Image: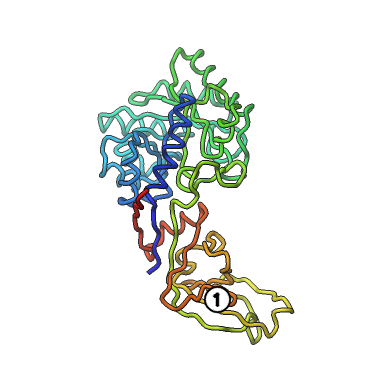
Amino acid sequence: MAFLTMDTRKLKDNFDYLNKLFKRHHIKWTVVSKLLSGHKAYLAELLKLGITQLSDSRISNIKALKSINPDIEAIYIKPPARRSLKNVVQYADISMNTEVRTIQLLSEEAKRQGKVHKVIIMIELGELREGVMRDKFVDFFQKTFSLDNIEVVGIGTNLSCLYGVLPTKDKLIQLSLYKELIEAKFNVRIPYVSGGSSVTIPLLQQKILPKGVNHFRVGESLFMGTDVYNDKPLEGLHTDVFKLTAEIIELTKKPRIPSGRLGTNVEGESYDFNEEDIGATSFRAIIDLGLLDVEESHISPVDKGITIVGASSDMIVLDLGENEQNYKVGDLVEFHLDYMGMLRAMNSRYIEKRVVSPPR
């Protein structure tokens, strides 16, 4: 069985780096834990870092989190489905919302449970995912403020996730001004301007983040060490907190070009081959990992001498060239993953999840 490892030392290094960065700028941040898919061993390691607020987009993951630490503040970071409102109020302390009717139903459910449910109102700033349209948000807040058992604790926005619309100083100034407008018009205080995420960290480092933005939601940069804005590693962070490992189950010298009439493979793909590879051979290895677990486009071998040449449902084929490292059947091959690769691997029940704590 292939396995995924979390390096707790590198995770702590990344957390400490980001925590110092945010503290230096007086910003509260929440760790977005959805990448961990509710895996309790991984969540437990995360909580050891001293985190006080976590965010997730799955109620089952928040339930797992609360079973480890009932006192942790949990944010449900997408508009709640009406059929899950009972669980949202029961397990999430805060939810992000874009529909007045949904908040009305949250109010009713919170009253039944004897709770005050906190909400962050998401504003549309151009990404066209979730968000109240800017010409309607004043009326939206007015209706929300009239509801019992609901406390508005923030205004927020989502950028970059759907179309890749990047955060800018101007967009985030807009968000901060909307918060000030609402506070002035309704004589209220809104604690959070949740305008930051992993993609916004470079604006903070460049000292161009508007001072009004005081809340960040960060997952990818913590777990993957990525500068999402520039699509590269973020200096100062580890990019290999997680590593995927699979065993070689066949290793044979084979032709580089298949023989026979070619159609399409299981993914509906067809292949073209270089003429210079006609008659050429190389060592090809099959590993116990496939498309049921992860797409090969989202992983890369740690050994730069290895090339992924294809995948089927339960096997991935590697080209080892002349096999200069003398791999053999039973040996393990390590892979780096990108964010989408991690999401897939975490949700595969065929991949074992392990924790490692190397000494410094």
Residue in view at x 34 percent, y 43 percent: 62
Count residues near mark 1 (Cα–Cα under 10 Å), then give few for <14, some for 14-19, many for 20+: some
95 shown above or below 310:
above
> Which quadrant of the structure image shows residue 282?
bottom right
Specify the quadrant of the image occupied by residue 59.
top left
The amino acid at mark 1 is: Asn
Q: Residue at x 54, y 59 (%)?
A: 298
Residue under numbered circle 1: 323
Q: In which quadrant of the rendered image does the N terminus lie?
A: bottom left
Residue 31 image position (x, y, % from top left): 41, 39
Q: Residue at x 33, y 36 (%)?
A: 50
Task: Say if 179 sits above or below 353 in the image.
Answer: above
Helix or strand or loop: what does disc 1 sit on? loop
Most distant residue in the right direction: 275
Which percent across, then down, holds residue 344? 46, 58
Residue closer to the observer: 183 or 148: 183
Q: Is residue 175 above or below residue 343?
A: above
Residue 81 visible in the displayed image: no
